[in-house]
Amino acid sequence: MAFYRPPAWQKPVALAALAAACALPFVLEAIDQAFYIGFATRLLIFALAATSLNLVLGFGGMVSLGHAAFFGIGAYVAAICQQAGINEALLVFPAAMAVAGLFALAVGAVSLRTRGVYFIMITLAFAQMVYYLFISARAWGGDDGLPLAGRMTLAGFSLAGDNSLFFASLAALTATMLLFGRLAQARFGRTLQAIRENETRMEALGYPVFRYRLAAFALGGAVAGLAGALLANLTGLASPNLLQWMQSGTLLVMVIIGGVGSLWGGVVGAALLLGLEEVLAGLTEHWHIVLGLLLLGVVLFAPRGIATLFGRRDG
Amino acid sequence: MTQLILEQALNGLQFGLMLFLLAAGLTLVFGIMDCINLAHGSLYMVGAYFVAAATQAADSFWIGLAVGVAGAALVGLLLEVSLFRRLYRRDHLSQVLATFALILIANEAVRAIWGPAAIMLNPPEALAGPVEFSLLGDAFFYPAYRLVIIAVGLTVAALLYLLVAKSRVGMWVRAGAANREMTEALGVNVRALFTAVFVFGAALCALAGGLLGPLLAVQVGMGESVLILAFVVIIIGGIGSIRGALVGSLVVGTVDTLGRALLPTLLRATLPADAAATLGPALASILIYLLMAGILFFKPQGLFPARA
């Protein structure tokens, strides 16, 4: 797969999408469908989480099956901060990013020593460790999760309204997309993609391969933590379900169907998957089967659509 | 105290042997075909449901077990021929996505057929009670059914060892795990071999699921938690190595069981009561993951790597 280069249509399309997103809450209110603002916020937050995984998976070439750990940790940090009386998002969100990022640093430091199937399984195992840790921690709600008393304030403004949280999430996603878009073309992103393409060569050229990978892994974890803190505000609960490995799988599916290694992959994938869920759940009770069959179809019949980049090295 | 430790040690052995049944098939699938199979836990779940359903129909646990294992092997065969064959040459990401989709389908199909509630499976009546031992003059009780599980587990492990280490087919399997292309070049039909390994792995899954059925609830999602443990076993033991899977299973089974039973007590003796009460269960539940991280830090390929 070639290096990331922004396509010519990107800037106008991105601006149009941003404008449409800004108008969305007002349009929904006007047509009396304000209920869907919550759904749209959820979509933005999952787009953010999937985008953070795409940095690790798409640009870094690391198939991590434990990304939900960082997502969930962000949510728990938000809930725990609020329990401790800190209700200002300008403090809580960076804290969530810092804790999730530092944990990703620790997990990456061990996991990145391994390759291939080992890496997939060890990231999965670490995420599961976090899951069991939170389930058995009674001080943090155990099985039931840790509820938030209410939404936080951002720079003094309350996030209690659906619109304010929507715009906060939109701002977080936009900032992340801008950052990752620049990063992908910067020296860091180029090196990361070159390592994905040919690790041995980059090693021979004297690049600190391990450190580049670790930095990308930690950054991805930190952004996932931000998404988690936002989600905790949306749902009012830091739930252990967020940490479960099926959640990691879902994020992975989003990135894969959206496009691995394309800047918009996470956003497109989250929109597709959540939209599909919403539609299928309305049609049949057993919509998981339909979703599973669709995914199998993607793997078997649209192989070029996914992950051409991993084909060479992994077999 | 001795009674507790001995009982928990036996429980750990029993749990470890059941983990081995799961991990043995999984490690060979990973090792020979370099194929990641997240749906291995679903085979375990489906096997347990088959055994439960067949037991209810036949009114005999042993007939139910045999029928259930055969049924799961058949499911394994169908899956291998229809899906997994297409996945071997694909990248890991496709394998993750496809087998993740299989989990969604399997969980939902089981929920649709048998309902969301857990099914209770009773052990055979002759084995329902405890067995009494005399140990250094003390009486010691242990459930007869668990002893049978240990016996079955040991027998299967021994047979598997003989099969893999001493037979010609086992030699092919080991050769395939060490170097697939070379084995193919030497004239072994790795494809057929792999179908056999996959089906055999599915049967072992169902055996473990059926045997554990009376101890744990047979329910949707039971495969996922045990799958992760099987992964930990394989990572610790080294992918593709049966010996590694055996050692890893016994280590994980014993450490997990003993940790949960003894760690809270030990902590209470050394730490203040409230600190021990919060730390104990949390530490016990992540003990094996810490163990895994420690082993991987020093041996990234696991204890007994199959590929040199």
Image (spheres, rainbow, N blue to C red):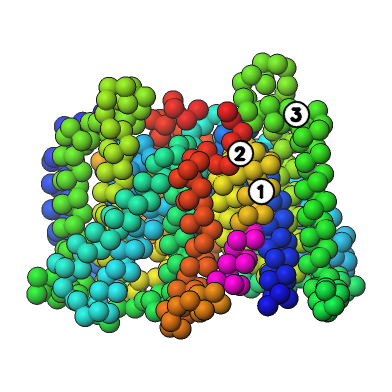
Tell us which disc is closer to us: 1 or 3: 1
Where B190 falls versus A45 (above or below)? above
B256 in the magenta segment = yes
Q: Is residue B68 left or right of residue A45?
A: right
Q: Is residue A140 visible?
A: yes
Residue B136: image x %, image y %? 83, 74
Q: Relative to residue A39, is residue B273 depicted above or below?
A: below
Amino acid on which disc 1 is placed: Val
What kind of element bears circle 2?
Answer: loop
What residue does disc 1 label? B247
On the image, the x and y values in percent for residue B30 come to 60, 38
Does label 3 or label 2 sit earlier along the sequence?
Answer: 3
Q: Are marks 1 and 3 on the same chain?
A: yes
Q: Is residue B86 visible?
A: no
Name the residue rendered at 22%, 35% in the picture. Answer: A189
Chain name for mark 2: B
Instruction: Tell me, yes or no, whether the two marked residues, 1 and 2, touch with CB atoms within 8 Å.
Output: yes
